[in-house]
Structure formats: C-alpha cells, structure tokens
C-alpha cells in the first residue's frame, strides 16, 4: 500500500473522487493530543498513526484527510466521528474498547474505510455507524468482530427523514464480520455487498425501510437467519447472487438491484463464493504495510 492511494471501487469512486489527504502535508502522530490536532479542520493532510493511542474519547475528523495506521498501531478507547465531513480515507486502523461507535459517519460524503480492525465487547452501539444522509461510501476489507450488538448499521433519521432522501449509496467489499449479534443492519438506501465472510453472526444482513440491496459472492457460517427484513414498517429488498447461506436462511423479499444497475465497474473484483472465505480471512483487517 502507499500513503496516497485513492478509492478506486464502489460508491466512493464516483460522484467526485475520494482522494483523502492526497497532496497535503504528512504528519506522524504518537500521542492522542497530537492526533486530535492533526485530524481536525479542513486542511488537506495525511496523518500516520504510530504506536498505541489510549483514551476514552471521540475524536472529530475533518474533511480532506487520509488517516493511516502504521503497522502495529492502535486506538484504544478512542473512537472517530465524521460529522459533515467530505473526502476522508481511513485505512489500517485498529480501534478497540470504545464505549460508543468505533467509527461514525453522520451527514458525510465520499468516505473510504479500508483494512480497519474494529472490536469491543462492552458497547451496545454498532461498531461502524453510517447515518443522517451520508452518501457515496465504500467499506472494504475490514475485520469487524467480537461485539454483542450490531457490527455495521446504516440508519435512517427518525426526526428528519428528508435528509436521507436519495442518499445512502454504500458499497461493502471483502469484509470479515465475526462473533457479533447482527452483521449488517441496512436501514435505508442502496447497498452493494460482495466478497464478504460472515462468521458466527447470529443474524446476518437485515434490509429495512425500503433499502434495496445486491448481495453477491459471500459466505455465511453460524447464522440462524442470514438475509432478512424486520424491525421496520416497510421491508427492504435483497437480490442474492452466488451466496452460501450455511445453516441460515434468506427470508427477505427479492430486490430490484442487479449488476446492470450498479453505476461503477466491479466485475474485475468479484470472487467466486468458493474462495471468499479463505481470501477474506487472509486479507481483511489492519494488515497493510507501507
């Protein structure tokens, strides 16, 4: 991997490039105080996290940032909040023991979350939260695990539905979700999920509130219900292609999305479900070297 890679697949690769801090100054941070200062504001920058930064806090991430964890680095008890942020790349970050969301995106656009490792046994909030009309997001090759509640939530605003209208275009690729209550709760919008391995997620993918999903080339093991729609007045819909359900079942209404309706090229990246498990276990998580 290189420090200046841009998002090249999924929804964060269209409607304006997601290049993060490309072209900005490079800063290496080794303390929480340095980190908080470096990631704030809208100055374009590449921030390299060195070592373990510990605390019990949520850090605001400004627009135009690439935040990259160096090998062996970690954020312990430190969560990341993107509120109204644009053009942000989060890569190779290990985030543990947060009391709320490990990463939250609210009213944010053009964000790439790649090769991160998210876990906590204590919080009831989802580990990755995408809310309040966030749009054009790609989430790739992350290891999201050991959490009693929902791993990934895409949530509709209960108090301001208008801000969500036509938003929430999100791609999930190559993620390993393990030992969680629910793998993905997709509360509204358009989702494309492929090349992923869901291991011991009691419940798999929940499509709610009219969400339209395309789920391809994925494997479920240890889920009682792999793909479903519940907890909303209006059900979601799911198109399923080359998915191994394991012991689980698919009870979701059939969706309208298909390969032709995906607005970016991706056929070059799709794996056969027969190799997804081995590939994802090998590659997902904070395993990048620069």
Image (cartoon, rainbow, N blue to C red):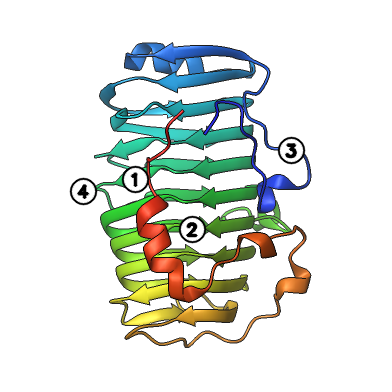
Question: With 176 as the anchor, is 254 left or right in this view?
Answer: right
Instruction: Using a 10 Å C-alpha cutoff, classify the residue at mark 1 as few (fewer than 14 neighbours), some (14 to 19) or many (20 or more).
Output: many
Pointer 2 with pointer 3, Cβ within 8 A: no
**Residue assigned mark 2:** 174
Across and down, in percent, residue 21 comes to 62, 23
Residue 88, relative to residue 265: is it above or below? above
Frontmost of labels 4 and 3 is 3
Please tell me which residue lies in front, 38 or 218.
Answer: 218
- Residue 17 got which mark? 3
Instruction: Using a 10 Å C-alpha cutoff, classify the residue at mark 4 as few (fewer than 14 neighbours), some (14 to 19) or many (20 or more).
Output: some
Residue 147, relative to residue 237: is it above or below? above
Q: Quadrant of residue 189?
A: bottom right
Frontmost of labels 1 and 4 is 1
Alpha carbon distance from label 2 to label 1: 15 Å
Q: Quadrant of residue 78?
A: top left
Across and down, in percent, residue 62 comes to 57, 25
- Label 4: element kind: loop
Residue 73, relative to residue 272: is it above or below? above
Alpha carbon distance from label 2 to label 3: 21 Å
- Residue 201 got which mark? none
Instruction: Using a 10 Å C-alpha cutoff, classify the residue at mark 2 as few (fewer than 14 neighbours), some (14 to 19) or many (20 or more).
Output: many
Q: Residue at x 41, y 51 (%)?
A: 283
- Residue 118 got which mark? 1
Alpha carbon distance from label 1 to label 3: 26 Å
Q: Residue at x 45, y 76 (%)?
A: 274
Alpha carbon distance from label 1 to label 4: 13 Å
| Sequence-earlier tag: 4 or 3 | 3
Pointer 4 with pointer 3, Cβ within 8 A: no
**Residue assigned mark 4:** 122
Frontmost of labels 2 and 1 is 2
């Amino acid at each position: 991997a290189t420090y200046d890679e841009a998002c090249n697949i999924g929804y964060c690769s269209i409607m304006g490039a997601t290049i993060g801090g490309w072209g900005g100054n490079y800063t290496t941070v080794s303390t929480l105080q340095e980190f908080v200062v470096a990631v704030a504001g809208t100055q374009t920058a590449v921030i390299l996290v060195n070592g373990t930064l510990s605390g019990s806090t949520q850090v605001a991430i400004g627009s135009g940032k690439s935040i990259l964890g160096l090998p062996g680095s970690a954020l312990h008890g430190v969560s990341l909040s993107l509120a109204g942020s644009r053009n942000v790349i989060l890569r190779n970050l290990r985030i543990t023991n947060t009391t709320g969301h490990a990463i939250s995106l609210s009213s944010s656009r053009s964000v790439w979350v790649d090769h991160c490792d998210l876990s906590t046994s204590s919080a009831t909030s989802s580990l990755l939260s995408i809310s309040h009309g966030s749009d054009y997001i790609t989430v790739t090759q992350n290891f999201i695990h050991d959490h009693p509640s929902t791993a990934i939530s895409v949530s509709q605003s209960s108090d301001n539905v208008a801000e969500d209208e036509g938003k929430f275009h999100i791609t999930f690729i190559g993620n390993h979700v393990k030992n969680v209550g629910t793998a993905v709760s997709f509360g509204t919008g358009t989702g494309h999920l492929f090349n992923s391995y869901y291991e011991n997620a009691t419940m798999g993918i929940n499509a709610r509130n009219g969400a339209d999903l395309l789920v391809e080339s994925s494997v479920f093991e240890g889920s009682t219900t792999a793909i479903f729609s519940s907890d909303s007045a209006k059900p979601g819909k799911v198109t399923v292609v080359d998915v191994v359900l394991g012991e689980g079942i698919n009870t979701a209404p059939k969706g309208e999305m298909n390969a032709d309706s995906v607005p970016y090229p991706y056929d070059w990246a799709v794996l056969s479900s027969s190799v997804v498990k081995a590939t994802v276990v090998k590659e997902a998580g904070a395993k990048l070297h620069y």
